[in-house]
Amino acid sequence: MDVNKNSYTFLFATAMVVVVAASLSFAATNLKPFQDTNVEQEKMQSILNSIQISVERSQAPGAYQTYIKEAFVLQRGEAIEGQDAFAIDLAKEIRKPDQERLSPLYIAEKEGETYYIIPLQGNGLWGPIWGYVSLKEDINTVYGATFDHKAETPGLGAEINTPVFEDQFKGKQMLDSNLSFIGIDVRKGDASSEYEVDGISGGTITSDGVEAMILDCVKAYVPFLKTHSGATATASLITE
Amino acid sequence: MADVLEKEEKAKELLIDKQPKEPLLSKKNRKLLNDPLNDNNPITVQVLGICSALAITVKLYPALVMSISVLFVMAAGNVIVSLMRNFIPNRIRIIVQLVVVASLVALVDQVLKAFVYDVSKELSVFVGLIITNCIIMGRLEAFALGNTVWKSFLDGIGNAFGYAWILLAVAFFRELLGSGTLFGFQVIPNAWYLANGGFYSNNGFMLLPPMALITVGIIIWVQRARNTKLIEE
């Protein structure tokens, strides 16, 4: 058999591609459930992390049941029925116009205090970045924040998921004294007020991404925040 | 008909008798395993695969997972290419090798994501970059294309171990001196640390890639000092 004939070469290449494609899709289909569980557990872990509870990934579902009391979906600042907050794909939602966007909100209870957790999704330098920010009962002061990224540069933009960066957000505020939403400004080294944090040297675009992400995602909650800020809003008050 | 078959059987037996079968681990085959560990180490002698050796050796556990992944890709890749070696069209052989390696790596990536998710996040792009690890393509092109399956398998295992032990050695020193732990377990007593009134502090520089390069350099130095075969005239 002449293995260098053109026809043979084409035949070989075609057969090879078909075999490889089939075996890889077989593997991918069979491993998908395991991978999905991991991603789900990690999401729960991040949500818990934003209210300063750190658990092993495998323990996350149990702890999630304990701490997260309620999860619902807001649209145009109002809670709507018939949506599973946990299953919402934020990456898709942030591309929709404000009027149609679905915004999940989680309500957690820890040591008798109630916290409101807002999921965030945005863009860094190389790919998506996301995170969770938890607000205290006044629905204004940040209790904790956690960020993660897909492909930011290690040592630079990737530093957004380190405690050094995340811990700065604790105690910052989302609304100013007139109850207008101003977000949190990620500054270049001169952060001083309760609306500013320091960015990451060498990670300016990622830092700006975090700022834009907070501005863009939290703004969907502003009507809700405004109505309930300062009041001891409870879950029942929101669903009313 | 039966006669013919019988004759053929006999002829085959004769043929086999004439060429005494090589034992599975003959001297030559053992050399395939041993050579890459020292005399012909892919990292320290051939200086291949340095990239990943620098990037994922901050801690032992990811280095171990990386080593096992490379071991699998290398052994399986060598075996598959060796099995197909007489059927691969010469003009597209590099592409064929790439497809074999790439699909094995994609498989490894999927398995890691399913079963050791946290490590797979830590290894991030470097799992994908196994494809471009020069050791693998180098062995496929230089060895598996021209040798039998068993020999190629041994060669793959040998080279993967040659890669693995350097990776683990570098990771051992970086984790011990940089974080004071081994496989995540603390080995430096807490009381030694400055924070607890001791005299010791972890060397943060060990965690950065330059120290990996320096550690590899020191290993090469020690290896060359001990192994006279490696000393150039």
Image (spheres, rainbow, N blue to C red):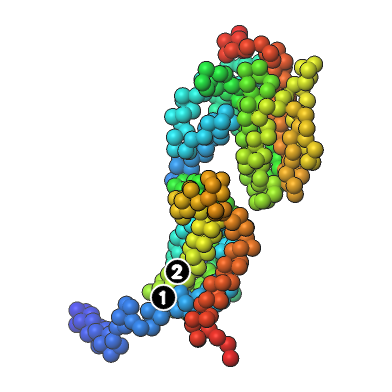
Q: Would residue A150 be seen by someone viewing this image from the given angle?
A: yes
> Between residues B158 and B151, which one lies in front from this camera angle?
B158
A140 versus A123 height, above or below:
above
Residue A117 point in image, percent of width and height: 60, 25
The count of marks equals 2
Evaluate if marks 2 and 1 touch, with contact meaning CB atoms under 8 Å apart.
Answer: yes
Residue A20 point in image, percent of width and height: 50, 58
A3 versus A199 height, above or below:
below
Mark 2 burial class by Cα count in 10 Å: few <14, some 14-19, many 20+: many
Q: Would residue B183 be seen by someone viewing this image from the given angle?
A: no
- Residue B101 in the figure: left or right of residue A73: left
B184 versus B138 height, above or below:
above
Closer to the chain start, of discs 2 and 1, is 1
Task: State how far apart marks 2 and 1 are (Cα).
Answer: 8 Å
Task: Look at label 1 and name its amino acid.
Answer: Leu
Residue B153 image label: none
Q: Residue at x 47, y 67 (%)?
A: B165
Quarter of the figure that contains the C terminus of chain A: top right
A200 versus A89 height, above or below:
below
Residue B21 point in image, percent of width and height: 29, 83
Q: Which residue is mark 1?
A: B33
Residue B202: image quadrant is bottom right
Query: Which chain does tag 1 point to?
Result: B
Q: Which residue is mark 2?
A: B161
Query: Which chain does tag 2 point to?
Result: B
Q: Residue at x 43, y 72 (%)?
A: B158
Task: Look at label 2 and name its amino acid.
Answer: Phe
Q: Residue at x 75, y 21 (%)?
A: A175
Residue B218: image quadrant is bottom right
Residue A101 point in image, percent of width and height: 68, 25
Disc 2 secondary structure class:
helix
